[in-house]
Amino acid sequence: MSCLRCVHFKPNSILPYVGYCEVKGRVESAPEHLTPCGDFKEASIDELKAVLRKDGWIYCLTCASTITSEEELLEHYRKHVVVPGALVDESVVEEAPGGD
């Protein structure tokens, strides 16, 4: 297990191996934490459903898409890495090369 499956880790939507740890209050790199820390807690299906009801969406790291219904959640949860949230970098467009 790594940070990617932890309920406290909010991965970046573009670079999912980098994210914010809500417990430590800082940005972390998931590959550096292949062994879970003492605060690791895998997100249960019930916790994900609660976040979905509260926020209206959760995120699938495997297919990089938002999940907006419990039916979608059940489909993704069995085979994918689903997290309760993701950091959406609004300035990511500035990192994209120009096409002109």
Image (spheres, helix red, strand yellow):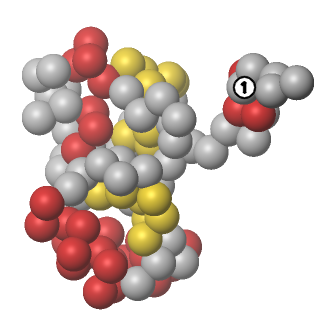
Which sits in the foreground, 35 or 65? 65
**Left or right for 89, reference 23:** right
Q: Secondary structure at mark 1?
A: loop
Task: Farthest residue to the front: give it.
Answer: 100
**Left or right for 16, reference 44:** right
Where 56 falls versus 93 (above or below)? below
Q: What residue does disc 1 label? A: 96
Identify the residue at image location x=72%, y=25%: 96
Residue 53: quadrant of the picture: bottom left
Task: Farthest residue to the right: give it.
Answer: 100
Task: Farthest residue to the top: give it.
Answer: 32
What amino acid type is highlighted by mark number 1? Ala
Residue 22 visible in the displayed image: no
Which sits in the foreground, 26 or 63? 63
Q: Tally the marks.
A: 1
Where 36 falls versus 73 (above or below)? above
In the rendered image, residue 14, in percent from the top left (x then y), is placed at 53, 35
Residue 65 visible in the displayed image: yes
Query: Looking at the rendering, in which quadrant would you find the C terminus?
Result: top right
Which sits in the foreground, 88 or 55? 88
Residue 55: quadrant of the picture: bottom right
